[in-house]
Image (spheres, rainbow, N blue to C red):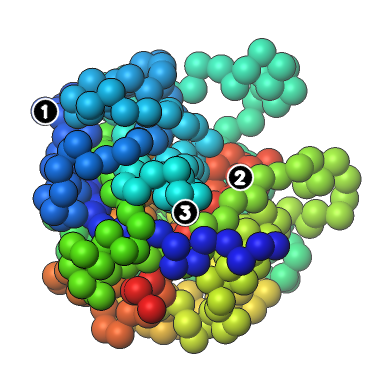
């Protein structure tokens, strides 16, 4: 592995719209809401941007195909704009395109934008028409809750954990997100829940209840990235840099034979190993100050804590119930409410995660602000446990 991109790219501005059922706003409104915050934060002009990447997953349901909607929404000066999609890692993929362009010297300043406008469809979940001609034949009946419920059952079996105990740990994951989301004015869901309400919620796919599942949202988020010398000219030495950006897709091993136990996400483990190496982190338990992970379901967050090396194998439930990942814990997770409560507009989610870490590093998170933030890790998992793409970014201050 090469030395990678550590400290070769600075983030000079970020923005995020309010997430939710945004009946009041079009995709264009959401994109502009996020962009205005980001460009004002960066202190640059629109004409300073050399190229842009636009993350949208369900294009037919909201902005349409191609990249020109972003160019049109922002009246960009005919610069190159590329639309990207990589399941739930779409937002991080947009960031990766912009970051790599700056790191390679192809751009001085680049924009990454993610947007999704899903609530207009009337779906409470993912409004998927087709997975592709052959995909529909290959896996015609799976649902995301069903696939991740299997992750929970496999995890409990592998580690000999009673399902009642696992359900309580899963409920704590959701409870924590609701506690944190309540403090976030941009969050979709701002309502505290009790553990009992979560545990007793109607079953969707055992062991998942409805309150173990995140919904989908309308929203947009973006980042403006630049060469470090440009960041220094704008703000001096106090700016955020990208320490690592890694992506790992499944290659068929999980579905091909029995070497995968069904109780972890193989891609997350691989992406984490590469991300820590690229960032120069040898002890993530001590170096990572907070995480934003892909809590599409409560069991996912629990398993990811182990796959990221932040809990020992089989110890995730105990660590969660002990408060290790609470707002006042050792490594707070989902301090902004996560997918569960901040919301999950698919194309924007990865950028939203990095937005929270960016705010925390700069001390701008207000009521959510943590102390002594060193590195923050954002993680996406697009797909299902046996076939997915994992994306990890690590941010820190300039060094």
The quadrant of the image that shows the C terminus is bottom left
Q: Are marks 1 and 3 in contact (CB under 8 Å)?
A: no
Q: Nearer the viewer, mark 3 or mark 2?
A: 3
User: Residue 286, how many percent across, how many down?
Assistant: 49, 86
User: Which residue extends farthest top?
Assistant: 133
Q: Secondary structure at mark 3?
A: helix
- Front residue of 320/167: it is 320
Mark nearer the N terminus (3 vs 2): 3
User: Residue 83, how many percent across, how many down?
Assistant: 43, 28
Q: Secondary structure at mark 1?
A: loop
User: Which disc, if any, is residue 103?
Assistant: 3
User: Which disc, if any, is residue 332?
Assistant: none
- CA separation in Å, label 3 and label 2: 23 Å
Q: Which image quarter: residue 152?
A: bottom right
Q: Is residue 230 visible?
A: yes
Q: Which image quarter: residue 117?
A: top left
User: Which disc, if any, is residue 389?
Assistant: 2
- Residue at position x 26%, y 62% from top? 231
User: Which disc, if any, is residue 24?
Assistant: 1
- Residue at position x 65%, y 25% from top? 141
Q: Nearer the viewer, mark 1 or mark 3?
A: 3
Mark nearer the N terminus (1 vs 3): 1
Q: Secondary structure at mark 2?
A: strand
Q: Is residue 214 above or below residue 86?
A: below
User: Residue 130, how many percent across, how many down?
Assistant: 56, 17
- Residue at position x 18%, y 62% from top? 234
Q: Are marks 3 and 2 in contact (CB under 8 Å)?
A: no
């Amino acid at each position: 592995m090469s030395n990678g991109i550590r400290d070769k790219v600075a983030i000079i501005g970020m923005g995020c719209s309010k997430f939710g059922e945004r009946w009041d706003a079009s995709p264009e409104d959401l994109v502009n809401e996020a962009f205005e915050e980001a460009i004002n934060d960066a202190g640059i002009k629109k004409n300073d941007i050399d190229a842009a990447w636009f993350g949208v997953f369900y294009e037919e349901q909201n902005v349409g195909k191609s990249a020109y909607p972003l160019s049109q929404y922002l009246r960009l000066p005919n610069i190159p704009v590329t639309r990207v999609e990589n399941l739930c890692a779409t937002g991080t993929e947009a960031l990766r395109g912009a970051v790599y362009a700056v790191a390679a010297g192809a751009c001085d300043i680049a924009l990454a934008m993610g947007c999704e406008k899903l609530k207009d469809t009337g779906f409470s979940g993912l409004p998927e028409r087709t997975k592709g001609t052959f995909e529909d034949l290959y896996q015609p009946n799976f649902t995301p809750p069903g696939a991740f419920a299997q992750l929970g059952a496999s995890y409990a079996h592998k580690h000999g954990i009673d399902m009642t105990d696992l359900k309580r740990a899963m409920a704590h994951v959701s409870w924590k997100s609701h506690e944190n989301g309540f403090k976030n004015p941009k969050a979709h869901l701002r309502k505290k829940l009790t553990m009992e309400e979560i545990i007793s919620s109607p079953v969707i796919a055992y062991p998942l209840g409805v309150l173990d599942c995140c919904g989908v949202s309308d929203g947009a988020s973006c980042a403006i990235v630049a060469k470090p010398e440009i960041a220094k000219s704008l703000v001096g030495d106090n700016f955020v840099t990208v320490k690592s950006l890694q992506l790992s897709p499944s290659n068929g091993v999980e579905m091909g034979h029995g070497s995968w136990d069904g109780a972890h996400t193989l891609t997350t483990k691989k992406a984490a190993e590469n991300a820590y190496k690229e960032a120069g982190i040898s002890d993530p338990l001590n170096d990572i100050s907070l995480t934003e992970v892909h809590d599409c379901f409560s069991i996912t967050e629990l398993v990811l804590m182990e796959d990221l090396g932040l809990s020992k194998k089989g110890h995730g439930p105990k660590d969660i119930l002990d408060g290790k990942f609470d707002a006042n814990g050792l490594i707070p997770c989902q301090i902004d409410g996560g997918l569960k409560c901040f919301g999950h507009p698919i194309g924007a989610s990865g950028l939203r995660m990095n937005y929270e870490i960016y705010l925390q590093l700069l001390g701008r998170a207000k009521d959510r602000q943590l102390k002594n933030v060193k590195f923050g890790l954002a993680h996406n998992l697009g797909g299902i446990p046996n076939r997915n793409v994992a994306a990890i970014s690590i941010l820190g201050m300039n060094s």
